[in-house]
Image (tube, grey):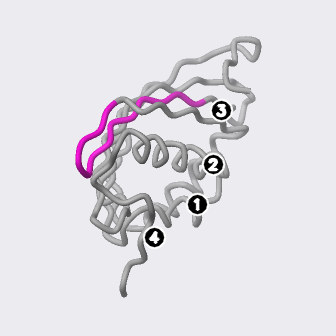
Amino acid sequence: MKEESKHPLPPFTMETARQKVQMAEDAWNSQNPEMVAKAYSLDSEWRNRTQFINGREEIIEFLKKKWQKERNYKLKKELWGFRENRIAVSFKYEYQDENNQWYRAYGNELWEFKANGLMRKRYASINDLEINAEEREIL
């Protein structure tokens, strides 16, 4: 199966790196696993916390389970750095669990892209902090 392209393409500039980060933030905030997965190569490799996820089908299944558990999910990403076909991002997101407890998750991601603009590698380190509803920052 031939992969499509996802603009902007590497090598990245400040403008195109910021655009990639904003596109990722918008896609993840849609909470649509199929749409999010289209930004990743068919053979994409992820490390998400302690999980290793490979390929779009596993990405879709992971995201479906994630957003069943993490309700009222809202994410904010920030470009940390870039060069050639790599981007580093810091982020935070907030969500509620099944008991209505709010959390804020903080983390960093390292991204590597193929020449066609699809992400081939995503390594995420994430920590969760219990918060009260009035402490929410991302509304």
**Residue 58 x %, y %:** 43, 65
Is the residue marked by circle 1 packed among few (<14), some (14-19), or many (20+) residues within 10 Å?
A: many
The residue that label 1 is drawn on is 33
User: Quarter-wise, where is residue 120 in the image?
Assistant: bottom left
The residue that label 3 is drawn on is 95
Start-end of magenta stretch? 81-93
> Which residue lies most toward the left here?
84
Residue 87 falls inside the magenta stretch = yes
In what element is the residue under mark 2? Answer: helix
Q: For this rendering, which residue is in front, 100 or 24?
A: 24
Quarter holding the C terminus? Answer: top right
Q: Is residue 111 above or below residue 104?
A: below
**Residue type pointed to by label 2:** Trp
Which residue does the image show at 59% across and 64% down from the upper left? 35
Query: For this view, does 46 lie left or right of residue 139?
Result: left
The residue that label 2 is drawn on is 67
Along the polypeptide, which appears first: circle 4 or circle 3?
Answer: 4
Q: Is residue 99 above or below residue 83?
A: above
